Image: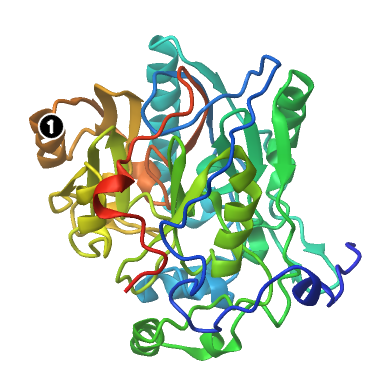
Amino acid sequence: MFKSLGTSFSTTYLKTYPVTGRRLSNSGAFQSYSVTTKSSSHSSPVCSWNEWDPLEAIIVGTPEGATVPKLLPEVKACTASQQWKFFEENAGKLWADSIPRKHWQKLEDNIKGLVLILQNEGIEVVRPTPIDFQKEYQTTDFKSTGFYAAMPRDFLLIVGDEIIEATMTWRSRFFEYVAYRPLIIQYWRDGAQWTTAPKPICGSNLIDKTYEAIDEVHRNSLMNSYQYVTTESEPCFDAADFIRAGRDIFAQRSQVTNLAGIDWLRRHLAPKGIRVHQLTFRDARPMHIDATFCLVKPGLAIQNPDRPCDQAEILRAAGWKVVNAPPPLIKDDHPLWLGSKWLSMNTIMLDEKRVLVEKEETTLQELYRANGVTPIPVSMRYANSIGGGFHCWTSDIRRRGGPQSYFDWSCGGIPETLV
């Protein structure tokens, strides 16, 4: 049982945020800070500032023990309506027992193959500790079973030598940190910085009950008015709603990351000279930015043409090329219980010139080649089916490089708010 954090949290820590607002009104996208970066004087096994420096060490998630979550409002807000019946019928069961056995075996083979490829590149690979996600737990505010430790990107945000544990918004992911704690403690003992963001109470104030009885049409209507399943009662965020580019980090307001969560990270990182900017997209069920907007290398970003970035012209003015990803080539009959076909975009850079990409996504491979990046085709299609691609299934722990500024904000300026 967890002792309640109480109700004083919102009155003593947070500024007031609009309940349905799309952005922060006073500290919105591209807010800058004139501060001096504090550098670490000690060596650390953890050091990663962006998405493209040469990769040296990485966490790869594990499918072991993965459990189907209950169809709670926050799950309903993030999943395709045609899959809701699957969650209702299989909640609390192992994924391995809920989907075709052959599919599960191929999923496991995908991850084993990914680990082998990374190791053959000389990259250190570590894994989280499998735990019993079927076991029901209880806080003072809710009961739930768990989910999985398959997607470390969702939980861990690495900024320089600092490991930041995200709050995690799905109630089924409240104790997901337990699977990563042995790794994190060892990194900390070896010199890494370690920050745990405040766990949300996840009670009735954070989750909008409107989503309990919605259908897909109603959900789309709510999103058209920017009414998310998460309110602004306390900070919440998943790490996968942030992408890193040295001294600039980009975030999206999603069903699992609220404006208060973005502002918590913005204020936490400001003393290090890191700017946290909010990007916006038109998305019916936004959850995690890495199948919507990807930073490939200095000067190159790929966006989802179905949900283009509203700030693309600002980024272009800052010296970046923003190109559209080609339509995914995944077949219509391939099951995606979580996620969408746009997991095709969910790649991971080995360095500025090489990227791991789904072997069947040949048009995306051509796009990378045309922009000076060599694609390394790898089979990941079956692993996509439970909600992640290369980027989701991993969290880079060490990349060879330091903090730099990659955007020339002097050209287009850094607007204080978004239109």
Look at the image and tell me in which quarter the N terminus lies: bottom right
Q: Nearer the viewer, residue 265 or 267?
A: 267
The image quadrant of residue 81 is bottom left
* Residue at 25 percent of width and 53 percent of height: 412
User: Which residue corresponds to the image point at 39% horizontal and 81% vertical from the top-left?
Assistant: 223
Specify the color scheme: rainbow
Residue 16 image-quadrant placement: bottom right
Q: Nearer the viewer, residue 354 or 99?
A: 354
Q: Is residue 192 left or right of residue 72?
A: right
Q: Measuring 45% from the left and 14% from the top, which residue is drawn there?
A: 119
Type of the residue with mark 1: Asn
Q: Residue placed at 46% from the left, 38% from the top?
A: 247
Viewer can see residue 25? yes
Residue 369 falls left or right of residue 220: left
Residue 311 placement, left or right of 135: left
Residue under label 1, please give it: 371
Tell me if residue 137 comes above or below residue 40 in the rendering: below
The spot of residue 342 in percent (x, y) is 27, 54
Counting from the top left corner in percent of width and height, residue 154 is at 53, 48
**Picture quarter containing residue 361?**
top left
Q: Regarding mark 1 in the picture, which secondary structure is present there?
A: loop
Check the image and report above or below for 117 versus 259.
above
Q: Can residue 381 be seen here? A: no
Task: Using the image, determine if residue 129 lies above or below residue 89.
Answer: above
Q: Nearer the viewer, residue 216 or 303?
A: 303
Mark 1 surroundings: few (<14), some (14-19) or many (≥20) residues within 10 A: few
Give x and y (percent) for residue 274.
53, 42
Instruction: Point out residue 220 in the picture as x, y percentages from the top left corner.
Output: 34, 83
